Image (tube, grey):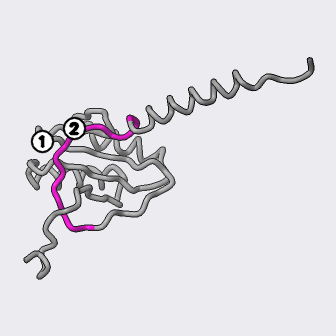
Amino acid sequence: MAEINVTPFVDVMLVLLIIFMVAAPLMTVGVPVELPKTAANALPGEQEEPLAITITAEGVVMIQTTEVARDELVNRLRAIAAERDSTKVYLRADGAVPYADVVQVMGALNRGGFDNIGLVTDTGGPALDASDG
């Protein structure tokens, strides 16, 4: 018999497809923070995976999902900036974090080589115009 049986190949491919479908949602940044709500529109996507800096309600600074001490933040950011094409970074801060802490981290981002900082918020907040009622 000179035919090739493709049934095992199809079975393996379907199993891999299911594994990737289950694993893909788990690959996002998973540091839980309570983002403030604004009326701003979403930013357009990019080709390179975005770098996310998170400030938790306790004031802990995290790069992606790795906790970083504040005195090491600038050095770590410089090392990351040297390896990346984009200077775009997303800053996620819990709504309970004082404004001074957010601004200090933004200054560290700038000193670390990231001058294009996007603040991440949730939608549905007040628009602060006449339509707010």
Whether residue 39 appears in magenta in the rendering, the answer is yes
Name the residue rendered at 26%, 33% in the picture: 67
Q: What is the number of the mark on residue 1?
A: none
Circle 1 residue = 57
29 to the left or right of 22: left
Residue 30 horizontal/vertical position (percent): 30, 37
Estimate how packed mark 1 is, as few (under 14), some (14 to 19) or many (20 or more) residues with alpha carbons within 10 Å.
Answer: some
Q: Position of residue 38 (x, y in %)?
A: 19, 64
Query: Position of 125 compared to 47: left or right?
Result: left
Query: What's the amino acid at mark 1?
Result: Ala
Seen at 35% across and 53% down, the residue is 89
Q: Which residue lies furthest to the bottom in this view?
A: 130
Q: Is residue 46 left or right of residue 121?
A: right
**Numbered disc total:** 2
What residue do we see at 35% from left, 44% from top?
Answer: 77
Q: Quadrant of residue 107?
A: bottom left
Q: What stretch is highlighted in magenta?
A: 26-40
Instruction: Report x, y in % for residue 90.
Output: 32, 53
Q: Where does residue 47 sit, x and y in percent of width and height?
A: 51, 54
Q: What element carries label 2?
A: helix
**Considering depth in this image, is 50 or 5 the residue closer to the camera?**
5
Q: Are marks 2 and 1 in contact (CB under 8 Å)?
A: no
- Element type at marker 1? loop
Which mark lies nearer to you, 2 or 1? 1
Q: What's the amino acid at mark 2? A: Asp
> Which quarter of the rendered picture does the N terminus lie within?
top right
Q: Name the residue under label 2.
A: 71
Q: Residue drawn 45% across and 47% down?
A: 49
Identify whether 99 is placed above or below 5.
Answer: below
